[in-house]
Amino acid sequence: MARSVAVPVVAAVVLLLVAWQVVVDGPLLGLDRSVRAAVRSSHRDHPSALLDHLGHLLSDLGNGVLAVPVLLAAGGLAARWWRRAGAGRWWLPLPVAALTAVLIPLLVVPAKAAFARPGPLGDPLASGQWGWFPSGHTATATFSYGVAALLLARAAGARTARWLTAAAVVSALGVGAGLVWSSFHWLLDVVASWCLAALVLWALDRWLPRTGA
């Protein structure tokens, strides 16, 4: 199901729709404002230091200082697993992991600068400051943990592969939820990064060879 052509089609449509709405300040941004209002109401009516701390911890999973080393380490471990499984190009996970680490800022930073969207706190952008759209932390988490799971799953058993996939999905969702709860990002900033990562991960999953494990 994850390899269905519907995945990139839906992701591309949603990404283009959201980007268009950000550019024209369209009605879909009302969803962002509604979610932001609900988060504020929850903070006010049901204050919880534990939830606030959890939101920050989840957000930090998308920090490149944590996510990129995990990605590179997974690339090295995957190369070892691929070699043990008898893969011809067992070294391939190493450059894939490294190129993914480079690709993240190449995709996200120019988009942030081009859209120049203010954050949910309403502060105007300072001169030379990047915008909030799309979410860099969400993209970093989804790309890093997603590619790590793809590389390792190629040489893992079916059960381990399912656990790796689940961990990557939960991490991506958790980072997005933490960012929105902590008012670090609008919801649609997060959704756009999920869609962008889905396109790349789908293509990578189609391209990576199978090891036969």
Image (spheres, rainbow, N blue to C red):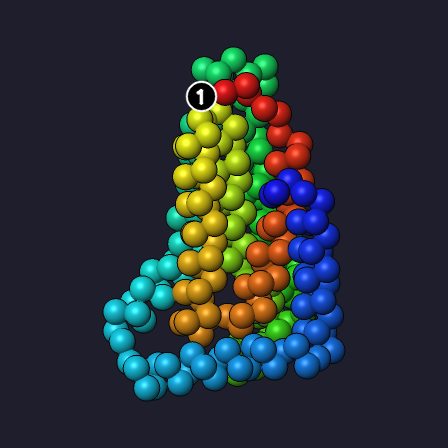
Q: Is residue 36 left or right of residue 189?
A: left
Q: Is residue 128 above or below residue 207?
A: below
Q: Residue 17's spot in the image, x, y percent? A: 72, 67
Mark 1, Cα crowd under 10 Å, few <14 / some 14-19 / many 20+, is: some
Q: Position of residue 2 (x, y in %)?
A: 60, 43
Q: Identify the residue at image location x=44%, y=45%.
A: 166
Q: Is residue 141 visible?
A: no
Rendered residue at 54%/70% (across/down): 187
Instruction: Give 159 or 102, whichever is nearer the viewer.
Output: 159
Judge from the rendering whether residue 8 lies leftward or rightward of residue 98; answer left or right: right
Residue positioned 47% across, 49% down in the render: 169
Q: Position of residue 6 (x, y in %)?
A: 70, 49
> What residue does disc 1 label?
80
Up the image or down, 211 lies above or below 179; here it is: above
Foreground residue, 91 or 15? 15
Label 1 amino acid? Arg
Residue that extends furthest to the front in the rendered view of this protein: 1
